[in-house]
Image: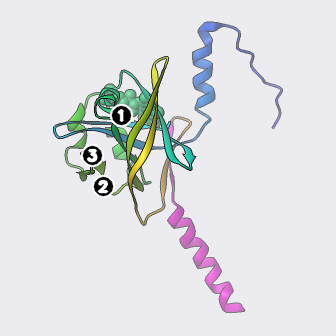
């Protein structure tokens, strides 16, 4: 790839705009972070979830401190991670829709409370119940470090990614099926 069009960031008013353009090139796995308990529940769509370490098992997510989820995560010290599958784009829309508030986001969709009471979404690729280990407040966001309390894996393996301002489905099962179709006739040849 040619580097002839490198842009130097000089005008401070342009920095944010340019930064957003850069970050749109970064594909992010789509998850819903859930928070609260009983009637006081909410959740939000995120792409900032990542693994911090495997030993010990820790995740990291960057949450805007203005988001309704942040206050509940701080108050209860727990949160849910729901990694969305390729057929769950509707959930990604719902949990980033500012017109829907807290419990409204859960209406009509399958979910259940984890051991800590935090809501966990049904049919996600994977769900993890986390305990807050640390919150590092930086600028507009809180970097939340979570330790794993429990997890659940679905049998499906087709994920949802957000890239360049749009959702993209990774149909892993479909790819595997195709691979199987191609390799079975080959196996017969032997
Ligand atoms: C694809 C996508 C990814 C997002 N990732 C994040 C994120 O990593 N951190 C964050 O604070 N907000 C993120 N947001 C925005 C939040 O989903 C949104 O601000 C939140 O739902 C607002 O919640 P509230 O109305 O309950 O305050 C993302 C939105 C979308 C559509």
Residue 101: x, y in percent? 24, 31
Mark 2 in CB contact with mark 1 (< 8 angstroms) = no
The residue that disc 2 covers is 122
- Label 1: state its secondary structure: loop
Q: Secondary structure at mark 3?
A: loop
43 and 99: which is toward the camera: 43
Give the left or right position of residue 19, taking residue 84 as reference: right
How far from the left and from the top, in percent, is residue 15? 62, 14
Q: Is residue 121 above or below residue 164?
A: below
* Ligand 1 has an atom within 8 Å of the beta carbon of the residue at disc 2: no
Query: Residue at the location (44% across, 44% down)?
Result: 147
Q: Which residue is mark 3?
A: 116
Which residue does the numbered mark 1 point to in the structure image? 96
Image quarter where ligand 1 lies: top left
- Quarter containing the N terminus: top right
From the Cβ of disc 1, is ligand 1 less than 8 Å away? yes
Start and end of the magenta stretch? 166-190
Q: The C terminus appears in which quarter of the rendering?
A: bottom right
Q: Position of residue 131 (x, y in %)?
A: 38, 41
Closer to viewer: mark 2 or mark 1: 2
134 shown above or below 16: below
Identify the residue at image location x=35%, y=40%: 79
Give the Cα distance between marks 3 and 1.
24 Å
x 50%, y 44%: residue: 58
Give the mark nearest the N terminus, 2 or 3: 3
Reply above or below: 156 against 44: below
**How many residues crowd around disc 2 within 10 Å: few (fewer than 14), some, or many (20 or more)?**
some
What whole-number distance in Å separates the C-alpha atoms at marks 2 and 1? 18 Å
Q: CA distance from mark 2 to mark 3?
A: 16 Å
């Amino acid at each position: 790839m040619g580097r002839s069009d490198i842009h130097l960031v000089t005008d401070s008013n342009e920095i944010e705009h340019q930064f957003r353009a850069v970050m749109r090139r970064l594909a992010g796995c789509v998850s819903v972070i859930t928070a609260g308990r009983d009637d006081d529940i909410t959740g939000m769509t995120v792409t900032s979830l990542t693994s911090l370490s495997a030993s010990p098992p820790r995740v990291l997510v960057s949450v805007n401190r203005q988001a309704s989820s942040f206050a509940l995560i701080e108050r209860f010290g727990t949160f849910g991670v729901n990694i969305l599958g390729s057929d769950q784009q509707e959930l990604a829309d719902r949990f980033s829709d500012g017109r829907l508030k807290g419990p409204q986001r859960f209406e009509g969709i399958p979910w259940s409370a984890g051991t800590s009471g935090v809501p966990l979404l049904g049919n996600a690729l994977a769900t993890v119940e986390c305990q807050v280990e640390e919150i590092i407040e930086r600028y507009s966001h809180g970097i939340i470090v979570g330790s794993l309390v429990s997890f659940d894996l679905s049998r499906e393996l087709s994920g949802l990614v957000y890239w360049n301002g749009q959702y993209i489905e990774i149909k892993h099962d479909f790819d595997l099926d195709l691979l199987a179709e191609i390799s079975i006739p080959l196996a017969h040849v032997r």
